[in-house]
Image (cartoon, rainbow, N blue to C red):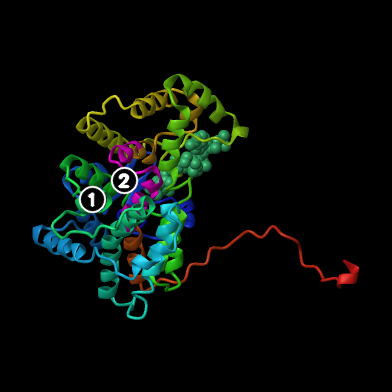
């Protein structure tokens, strides 16, 4: 019995920690941020309100929201020295490798003065990370396309500012489209936190030693990059492009069913959801809205994705294995429609998940009982034996 929730002893023994931030019921397909259903937050709140909620436990009122937004907005610039880090990367470096490097480098700007046992300093670290990730993601994009970095603006909302830093250039200012900005904001809300997923567990384990929080978030970014985790949206879109047309779906499905092929249906399946991922439904709706706004209702990839989803959901191979679309199945199509390059999809996921990582890190550091993480193993190696001298080997 933990608070209002009862778990069976077997589950309790496997839990890596206790947390009050996010609740998932994999069988019901339910996701709550601090008790609020994700499908209501995606409609009745914006991303920064969701950040405030995940960090502080309650949704902000108008005055609290205004103060939080102003503080985040005024931390969106990065130190000018950061520009030099980018010069060291190849222009074609994967944005996730750039983010691992540049977010880790932020630790060098906030190392000496940072006392993680001081709640106020933990809060400003959280604000800096929420504020600077979009700037670094946009800088990684600009560097890859050979365009100059674009500074953030204080008169734009969080998501509009990101689109500005991505798509404005010295010759032409990005024209804010509210439907597209709202869609990006919703994508960020849907990806903000997801209890103890692989990358969040990485951040918690790194943070449990008292390491610098910026370095811990860089560790989370490294873990998220994997195709089985945050890299799935990039892999799912590449899979759709590989299938090409609906008539090729049966051939692809046959390949997935052939265990020797090692081919997975990217964007399907989940370690916890054995029902629909509630985020996938919201992502499909967002997809519809964006494509309608852009007059791309007949986008071939979206039609292919819907046909693939329909076929898979009627196929016993997937149904019997409880494999349903997850958050990554549609997110690639939406992000493509927003003009975001495939290589940056996981960077957007990292931008969104930063609040989840830092809220979970903060919850752990604030716990006076917290100890350094030390997972145990089942040893299956050689029994004790003596070392022979080299002439006897
Ligand atoms: C995210 O943890 C989180 O919360 C993560 C995340 C978050 O917000 O942080 O939700 C984000 O990572 C979503 C997942 C994105 N990954 C993908 O879409 C990649 C494709 N999915 C798979 O790699 C897989 O589904 C996993 C990794 C997500 C889960 O793998 P599991 O735990 O091995 O799945 P399972 O145990 O439920 O598998 C049951 C069976 C196995 O086959 P059998 O041995 O029973 O014959 O289903 C098979 C698996 O091989 N299977 C798949 C499959 N996923 C599982 N077969 C084909 N295609 C797939 N996608």
SS state under label 1: loop
User: How far from the left and from the top, in percent, is residue 338?
Assistant: 28, 40
What residue does disc 1 label? 168
User: Within the image, what quadrant is residue 99 found in?
Assistant: bottom left
**Are there few (<14), some (14-19), or many (20+) residues within 10 Å of tag 1?**
many
Q: Which residues are magenta?
A: 333-354
Q: Which mark is residue 31?
A: 2
State the residue in front, 209 or 125.
125
Spatial separation of the CA atoms under disc 2 and disc 1: 35 Å
Marks 2 and 1 in Cβ contact (< 8 Å): no
State the residue in front, 4 or 34.
34
Residue farthest along the top direction in this orientation = 247
Residue farthest along the bottom direction in this orientation = 112
User: Within the image, what quadrant is residue 209 found in?
Assistant: bottom left
State the residue in front, 346 or 54.
346
Q: Earlier in the sequence, mark 2 or mark 1?
A: 2
Left or right: 80 in relation to 179: right
**Are there few (<14), some (14-19), or many (20+) residues within 10 Å of tag 2?**
many
């Amino acid at each position: 019995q933990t608070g209002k929730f009862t778990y069976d002893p077997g589950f309790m023994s496997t839990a890596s920690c206790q947390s009050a931030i996010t609740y998932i019921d994999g069988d019901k397909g339910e996701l709550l941020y601090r008790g609020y259903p994700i499908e209501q937050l995606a409609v009745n709140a914006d991303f920064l309100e969701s950040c405030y909620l995940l960090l502080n436990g309650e949704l902000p009122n108008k005055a609290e929201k205004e103060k939080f937004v102003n503080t985040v907005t005024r931390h969106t610039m990065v130190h000018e020295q950061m520009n030099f880090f980018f010069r060291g990367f190849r222009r074609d470096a994967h944005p996730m490798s750039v983010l691992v490097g540049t977010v880790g480098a932020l630790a060098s700007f906030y190392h000496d003065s940072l006392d993680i046992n001081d709640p106020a300093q933990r809060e400003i670290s959280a604000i800096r990370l929420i504020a600077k990730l979009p700037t670094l993601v946009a800088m990684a994009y600009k560097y890859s396309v050979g365009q100059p970095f674009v500074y953030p603006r204080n008169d734009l909302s969080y998501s509009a500012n990101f689109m500005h830093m991505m798509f404005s250039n010295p010759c032409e200012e990005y024209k804010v489209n509210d439907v597209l900005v709202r869609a990006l904001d919703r994508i960020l809300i849907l990806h903000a936190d997801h209890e103890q997923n692989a990358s969040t567990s990485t951040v918690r384990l790194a943070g449990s030693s008292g390491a610098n929080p910026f370095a811990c978030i860089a560790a989370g970014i490294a873990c998220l990059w994997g195709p089985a985790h945050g890299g799935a949206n990039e892999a799912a879109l590449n899979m759709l492009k590989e299938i090409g047309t609906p008539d090729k779906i049966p051939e692809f499905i046959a390949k997935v069913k052939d265990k020797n092929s090692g081919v997975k249906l990217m964007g399907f399946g989940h370690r916890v959801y054995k029902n629909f991922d509630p985020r996938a439904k919201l992502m499909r709706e967002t997809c519809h809205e964006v494509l309608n706004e852009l007059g791309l209702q007949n986008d071939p990839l979206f039609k292919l994705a819907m046909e693939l989803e329909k076929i898979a959901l009627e196929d016993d191979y997937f149904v019997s294995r409880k494999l349903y679309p997850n958050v990554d199945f549609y997110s690639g199509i939406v992000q493509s429609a927003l003009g975001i390059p495939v290589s940056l999809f996981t960077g957007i996921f990292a931008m969104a998940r930063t609040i989840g990582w830092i809220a979970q890190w903060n919850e752990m550091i604030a716990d006076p009982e917290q100890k350094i993480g030390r997972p145990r193993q089942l040893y299956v190696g050689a029994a004790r034996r003596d070392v022979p001298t080299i002439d006897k080997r």
